[in-house]
Image (cartoon, rainbow, N blue to C red):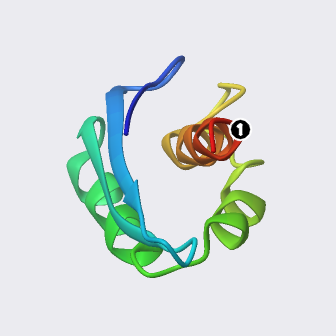
Amino acid sequence: MIYRTQGVCANSIEFEVNDDNTIKYAKFNGGCSGNTQGISQLVAGMNVDDVISKLESINCGFKNTSCPAQLAKALKTYKSQQ
C-alpha cells in the first residue's frame, strides 16, 4: 500500500503487511533519511496493532503529527480497508 502523508516532511509511506498481521516492510519517501530508515527497520516484523499503539501519539516539534504517527495512521487506514 502507498499512503500519502499529511503535515510531515515525508511525502508518502509504502508498506506491506503479512498474512499474520505483521509488517513485512515499510519505506518512507522523503523525510529525515536516518530517522525514517530507523523506523522502517524497527517496525519490520512487528504486529500492526502494536505499531499503531506505540507510534500514533508521537509529535514532531510543534506539529500535531510526525512520520511515526503518519505510519500509525496509514496502518489504521489499511486495517479499515480489510
Using the image as rendered, state which of residue 67 and residue 72 is in the foreground: 72
Q: Which residue is mark 1?
A: 80
Q: Is residue 20 above or below residue 78?
A: below
Could you tell me residue 16's position as x and y percent? 36, 56
Left or right: 9 in relation to 29: right
Could you tell me residue 64's position as x and y percent? 72, 26
Q: Is residue 50 above or below residue 14?
A: below
Using the image as rendered, state which of residue 30 and residue 45 is in the foreground: 45
Left or right: 31 in relation to 19: left
Residue at left offset 72%, top offset 49%:
56
Left or right: 9 in relation to 57: left
The outermost residue toward the top is: 6
Q: Quadrant of residue 29?
A: top left
Left or right: 10 in relation to 45: left
Q: Quadrant of the C terminus?
A: top right
Q: Amino acid at mark 1?
A: Ser
Residue at left offset 53%, top offset 79%:
46
Could you tell me residue 36's position as x and y percent? 33, 53
Residue at left offset 72%, top offset 66%:
49
Secondary structure at badge 1 equals helix
